[in-house]
Amino acid sequence: MVTRIQEIDVLRSVAIIFIIFAHIDSFTSLPIFDELDEIFAFFGISIFFFISGFLMQKNNNFATDKDVSFFFKKRVLKIYPLYWLSIVAIYAMDKIGFDVVYSNDIAADKFLLLSYIFGFQGLIHEDYALSVWWFVGVILLYYFLFSIILHYSKSFGGLLAYSFFMVLPLLFLRNEFNLVNVNVFSYYFIFIAGILSAAAENLESFKKITLSYSVLLLSFLLMSYLGINTNYLSDISKRDLVFLIFVLIFTLYNIKFSCQNKFKIPMSVQKLADSSYSIYLFHIPLLTLFQSFILMSFSLEILNRHLFDYLTLFLGIPFTLFSGYFIMIYLDKLCNKYKKKFNIIHIRHFIGLMRQIMKNRDFVK
């Protein structure tokens, strides 16, 4: 049984709130969100990538080919159903006439849409890719690459070496064939940081780490980020290296106490953490629907700009969080229902086959 880590739930909840606020500037006219959207996006997405790498290493075994296959089956069942539903939802809204931001008119390019359905957008250059769903394509590519790395690396040093050399073919594809999304490189070190944090958790050299060092490194991270121009890949790499140092030490400190239950997080935080992926996929169309409803419900004369903004902040965001959670619950129940039916059919087929074998044995006797 996998132990639930409370710190991971808190980080997931914080990350999804950051991501919503990173995109809320497209739905409001408040200038503060225009100024902070890049910072919100950086921290929100970085936390998600770090957690994904951490849990990939901590909760899975990659010793055999069967282990790797089992990991991919779990990831496919977790990622694709909600992902495909979000594609259908945004595609339908785009066809109806909704102006869904970041969707780039997904119905216009059928080949591009097909590549997104399969989750190949991590291999597509960002100039041609859709703005929405890029995270899914990148995380799928990471899962593929690092399942190979974790399968063949037998030591901490081997993990570092394989991680470094694995990025070289990706750089070649980008430079020579204009392939691979830039975000694959932007968050590569952060994903590695998650894996290393889980792998290095039991190393003796990390057991003397104190919270003071963690806070100090967090300060360095914030100062370095404020002075970095994120338009350049070299600056992104520098940013990620600082973040790598911070998350590695800070997380190791927290994980050391994670199983002692020093505090109990609210159930609402756990539910928000569980539904964070669903909220990420659906927050753009849900906020679009909410704003359309507000515009239809109120006349433009009484709906001034600030009232519209505050309705979006204080009603639209909670609506998005609750709706994302219930979409996840409904789809999980639907998938489990069909999974049980599928299993029952196979069990009945197996029982019928065994009965037939027993009858044949009796006939032979």
Image (cartoon, helix red, strand yellow):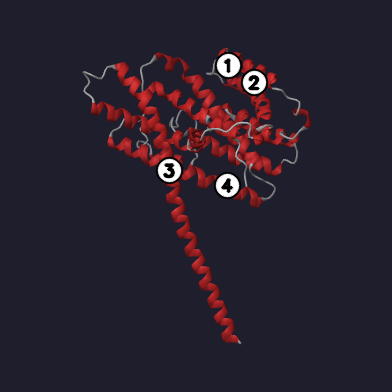
The three-letter code of the residue at mark 1 reads Tyr
Residue at 58% in and 16% down: 225
Discs 2, 4 touching: Cβ within 8 Å: no
Q: Which structural element holds mark 4?
A: helix
Reading the image, the residue beneath label 2 is: 242
- N-term-proximal mark, 3 vs 4: 4
- Quote the CA–CA distance across marks 3 and 1: 35 Å
Residues under labels 2 and 1: Cα distance? 9 Å
Q: Is residue 289 left or right of residue 252?
A: left
Q: Which residue is mark 1?
A: 225
Residue designated by label 3: 84
Quarter of the image for the C terminus: give it: bottom right
The mark nearer the N terminus, 3 or 1, is: 3
- Kind of residue at disc 2: Val
How far apart are labels 2 and 4 at the CA level?
31 Å
N-terminal of the pair, mark 2 or mark 1, is 1
Up the image or down, 68 lies above or below 187; here it is below
Q: Answer few, some or many: residues within 10 Å of disc 1's Cα (few below 14, many 20 plus, some between 14 and 19).
A: many
Quadrant of the rendered image containing residue 260:
top right
Q: Nearer the viewer, residue 333 or 22?
A: 333
Side of 292 relative to 182 (left or right): left
Residue 322 or 153: which is nearer the viewer?
A: 322
